[in-house]
Image: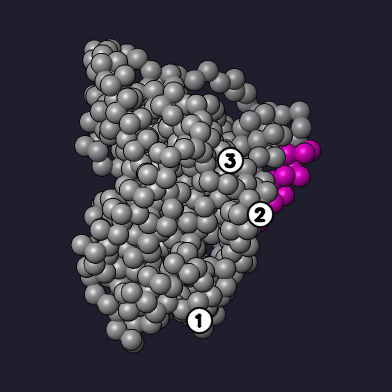
Amino acid sequence: MGLCCSEKNETSLNALPSWQQFKRMLNRELSHLSEMSRSGSQVSEYLSTTFLDKQNEVDLPCTVPKSRDRKRRQTQQGQHGTQQHATLQHQQACSGGGGVGGAGGAGEGGTLSQISGVRKVSLTSGAVVSRFGVKTDQEDLLSKDLEDINKWGLNIFSVALHSHNRPLTCTMYTIFQERDLMRMFRIPADTLVTFLLTLEDHYHADVAYHNSLHAADVAQSTHILLSTPALHAVFTDLEILAAIFAAAIHDVDHPGVSNQFLINTNSELALMYNDESVLENHHLAVGFKLLQEDNCDIFQNLSKKQKQTLRRMVIDMVLATDMSKHMSLLANLKTMVETKKVTSSGVLQLDNYTDRMQVLRNMVHCADLSNPTKSLDLYQQWNKRIMEEFFQQGDRERHRGMEISPMCDKHTASVERTQVGFIDYIVHPLWETWADLVHPDAQDILDTLEDNRNWYQSMIPQSPSPPFYSSDGEEAPPGDEDEEEEEEVKREQQERRQSETDFVFEATPDPQDSGVDGLMDRGGEEDEAEEDARNGVSLSET
C-alpha cells in the first residue's frame, strides 16, 4: 500500500511524466485504500481532507457508513441538536469569551476589528541577558543539549526540560547567535529576548502538539536546512532572517483544532479570513502584532525597504504551512528539480527571487513535516502528542454533536496505519523530492524516514482492529447485526465498482508510463493484484 519508500527503487517521483499522472495515481491509491478496510477509509479521508487544496482533487468513493454508525449519528444529532443551536446563539451573543483554544485564543469570541489572542505579558527583564536568553538553574545541562544546535534531530524535549519550559526562546536565541544575526541587523539582545519570551507565551502550553516545542523544533530544523551544502551562499542574510522568523511564529496562538473545525463552528477567525488558510493568517497577524509590544521590535533598525521585503517573505512562507497547499508546493518543487542548475561545486543556482522563495517555502514546509525524519524515540513522542490533540478535537466534536473529523475519533483511529499512510503519501514524496534538489545532502534524513516507516509498518499486525462503540461510548458486543452490516458494505461496494468504472481511472496509463506505476508500492497484497488485473494496470512490486 502507498508510495514506495521501504526500498530505493529506480522509479520514483522524479520518473513521473506529468503532474496530472501523479494526481491520477494518487487518486487511484487513495480510492483503493478507502475500500480496503474501515481504518483504511479513515486514513484515506484524513490524507485527502488535510493535504489537498480542494476536495475534488482526489475523487474518493463515498464511504459506506455502517448501520450502527448511522444510528449513532442520528441519535447524537437528536440529542445535541437543540443544545448545539443554543450554544452557538450564546457564543454569537458573547463577544468577550475565550476562544476554542483557551483564554484569549483563536476562537469564536472577540471583535473582528481587533487581532484576537494578543495579550499583555508580564516579564521580568534585567540589564544582563543570560547565556541562552533564559534563566535556569540547569544551565550546564542546557548547554550540553544546545551543543547539537547545528545537528539534525536536536532533542527539543530535553531543551525544554532544562530551560524551565522555554525551548523556543533559548533555541532561537542560540540560532541568532550562531548566525550572528543580532550584530548583522543591529538587534539589541534584551529586545530579542523580550520578543522571544512574549512570542513563547502566546503559544498555548495546554495544546498537546502545536505549542512552543513544535515551533522551536521547526525553527531549528529550518536553521539546519538553510545550512545544507547545496544551498551554500544561495540566500541573502535578510532571506535567512525571514525564514527563521517565519518558522518561529508559524503556529503562534494555535488553539489545538483544525481550520475545518473553525469553519464548521462559524468561528470569528473563519469569518475574518473568509475560510481561507484561517489559522495561518491568524498566526501571521499575531506574530507581527507582537512586534509592537513594549521592547519587542527586533526589526527596529531595518530600513523601510528591508521591513517590507521581510514581511512579504514571511507571509509567503507561513501561508505555505497550510497543509492543504501541500500538493501544489510539491508540484512546484518537482518542477524545480527537473530544471535545476548547479555550479561546478554542486551548489544550486537560484538566480531570481521567485526561485529562492519557492525553495524557502518548501524548506519551512519540510521542517514542519520533519517529525518522521527524526530519531524514532523523538518521532514517537511527536506522534503521541499529535494524536492526543486530534483526539481532543474529536471529543469536542462529539460533545457538540458534530461529525467527528478523520483520525480524531479515539475509539476507531488506527495510529500505526495513519503514520504509514502519512509517510507513504505525504512525507516521503516531499522529502524524496527535497533530497533530489539538494543531492546528496539529505540522504541520511531520507534513510531515517524509511526506517521509521518500516517500524510503524511492523507494528500494524500487533494493533487489532478497533472495537465498535455504541452511542453512549460503551463497547458493543459482536452479533448478527455486524454480519449484516459487512454484507451491506460488500454489496454497495460491488455496485459502486460496477457503476463507477471510470470514476477513479480517467484513463488507463500507456505502457510507456510504467514509471508512474512504479511510484506506488502495492506490498504484494492479493486483493490489490486482483484489482490491478481487473483494470488492466500493472504496478511494480517492491
Could you tell me which residue is drawn at 56 percent across and 21 percent down?
123
Closer to the chain start, of discs 1 and 2, is 1
Q: Nearer the viewer, residue 15 or 482?
A: 482
| Residue 477 left/right relative to 151 | left
The reply to whether dot 3 and dot 2 touch (C-beta < 8 Å) is no
Could you tell me which residue is drawn at 58 percent across and 44 percent down?
382
Q: Nearer the viewer, residue 55 or 193?
A: 55
User: Which residue lies under the disc numbered 1?
Assistant: 10
Indicate the position of residue 534 as horizontal and vertical percent values: 33, 74
The reply to whether dot 1 and dot 3 touch (C-beta < 8 Å) is no
Determine crowd level at label 1: few under 14, some 14-19, many 20+ residues with C-alpha closer than 10 A.
few
User: Which residue lies under the disc numbered 3?
Assistant: 384
User: Which residue lies under the disc numbered 2?
Assistant: 375
Q: Nearer the viewer, residue 63 or 373?
A: 63
Q: Which of label 1 and label 2 is nearer to you?
A: 1
Closer to the chain start, of discs 1 and 3, is 1
Query: How far is the residue under mark 1 from the one under mark 3?
Result: 34 Å
Specify the amino acid type for callout 2: Ser
